[in-house]
Amino acid sequence: MHHIATTNGLTMTSTLKRTAFAMTAVFTLLHVLTAGEPKHITILHTNDAHASFTPHEAFWIKTPPKPLVGGFVELAWAVDSLRKVKPAVLLVDAGDMMTGNPITEYQYRGAFGGALFEMMNRVGYDIWCPGNHDFDISQDNLRSLTAIAKFPTVSANLVNETGGVPANNKPYMILESNGVKVAVIGLTTTSLNELIIPSNFKGMKVLATAQTAQKYIDELKGTVDLLVAVTHQGVEDDSVLAANVNGLDMIIGGHSHTRLRHPKRVNGIIIVQAGSNLENLGVVDLTIQDNKIVKYDGNLLQLWYTSERPATALSVFVDSIKTAIDADYSETIATIPADLRNTVTESALGNFITDAQREASKSDVAFMNTHGIRKNVTAGTFTKKDLFEVLPFRNVLVTFTMTGAQLRSVIQNYLDERPAIQTSGIRCTWKRNGSGKAEILTLSVNGSPVVDAQTYTAAANDYLVSEAKRYLGFPVAMQVYTTMSLYKVVEQKMRNEKTILASIEERITETK
């Protein structure tokens, strides 16, 4: 009995094993038969072009002559080349096409800067998400720009007060290339109201990014091969977004001007960004199977200028715009003996610009938001176009008054919070006390000690004044808007001095 039982047991076990093996083979065969074939797509991306439609000097190269980089002609050549060798390609922009070059002061088809969007049409963009600088002129102008675009505008969290769309934007679009379906959800920075002047934000609101994104991810999941967010909020906020959503495959970012030479990954989500000023084209190759990315590779392609490119319809269009701008802006207004770099702390360039504001308005002191200075200055001749690239915004001077006590609080706020501002007319020495807190030792205006009860006149541009609490520590009262533009007062000072010998003067300096 024992022998028979053992034999029967072995026989039954062997049979079960063969049955299990057969079933596994069947399931494996069924999976192979039903699993989707791998699909391949390449996503090309740009961000923060800032109207850099022609090549410019590679400022990071230390030895002259500095090579030229960027521009729409080089971009188009690279995009066209990749389209010839890749099976499926999409071209995406993550915002801030505007502001940085006088092209934004020229109307094309009813929109200031409209020629930029015609260039995007000719390169063949598939989709974009607006950035904060795309609102710099007005909401109406942005709507006119999006009307020129032959590609959709997406921003799911940018709405007006009635829940409608302020910039002809849609929450998302589904794009298809060579059988690959990609849903692209747009997301704009929630700090938009702090980054544009109040009149340009009027009637709009920006919804929370993660909750908005998740709503559309849940709606679209399973209907497309790939779920992508194109955002204008910065790489840190992109990382936070990735950590707080489920089901997203990729984030194409802008705003922080970050050169991610290779993609980063947070919570399984690929994050990319391509720097700024059309100096690089982001290239991401993806392999997708069963609605999941199973392989990816990404890099930045540097867009070095090559003079031997054959003429195209795009290059002829670009040259025609450049010729018109050069005729108006090529005049030399000053000579710069040495490079002037803009830095978050005191800079020679910041000193010159704030001095121009203080002198033009006949004020005691002046302030300038450092990030409103948009370009470093290279030694040599300096043209009207160069100045526009340094100060591209349509800012006007605003004057206001403050007491000596308020001025003291501005400097204390600067020492404690380090807002990015430049100053004129102010001298301060300070040290850290035993507890590590910054302590003002001396504070003077134009050589005289500050008197707390005395009233002082001040000047700043309209954007800084609208954000005075952030930059100065308190909102300013009794504002007087002048008819003087920031650009014009700096231009006049340059013309008067002819040779710009600006320097760092340690206007606010720490002592030991």
Image (cartoon, helix red, strand yellow):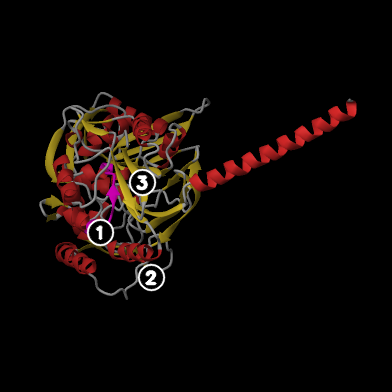
Residue 63 located within the stretch drawn in magenta: no
C-alpha distance separating marks 3 and 2: 43 Å
Query: Relative to 238, is 110 on the left or the right?
Result: left
> Which comes before the other along the chain, label 3 or label 2?
2
Tell me which residue sits at (23%, 60%) in the image: 122
Query: For mark 2, does the 10 Å Cα neighbourhood hold few (<14), some (14 to 19), or many (20 or more) residues?
Result: few
Q: Name the residue tied to disc 2.
A: 65
Q: Along the polypeptide, which appears first: circle 3 or circle 1?
A: 3
Q: Nearer the viewer, residue 252 or 170?
A: 170
The kind of residue tagged 2 is Pro
Determine crowd level at label 1: few under 14, some 14-19, many 20+ residues with C-alpha closer than 10 A: many
In front: 187, or 4? 4
Q: Secondary structure at mark 3?
A: strand
> Does the residue at mark 1 contact the one at mark 2 (Cβ under 8 Å)?
no
Residue at position x 21%, y 29% in the image: 163
Q: Quadrant of residue 251?
A: top left
Confirm or deny contact between disc 3 and disc 1 (CB under 8 A).
Answer: no
Query: Is residue 74 shown to the viewer in this render?
Result: yes
Judged by depth in the image, the label closer to the viewer, 3 or 1, is 3
Residue 127's x, y, as percent? 28, 49
Question: Which quadrant would residue 207 be assigned to in this image?
Answer: top left
* Residue 263 horizontal/vertical position (percent): 47, 49
Give the residue at mark 1: 386
Q: Position of residue 492 (x, y in %)?
A: 17, 54
Taking 348 as reference, is 66 above or below it? below
Q: Which mark is residue 397?
A: none
Q: Which residues are magenta?
A: 119-132
Residue placed under numbered mark 3 in the picture: 182
Q: Crowding at label 3, few (<14), some or many (≥20) Cα neighbours within 10 Å?
A: some
Q: Is residue 87 above or below residue 420?
A: below
Q: Amino acid at mark 1?
A: Asp
Q: What whole-number distance in Å separates the C-alpha atoms at marks 3 and 1?
A: 40 Å
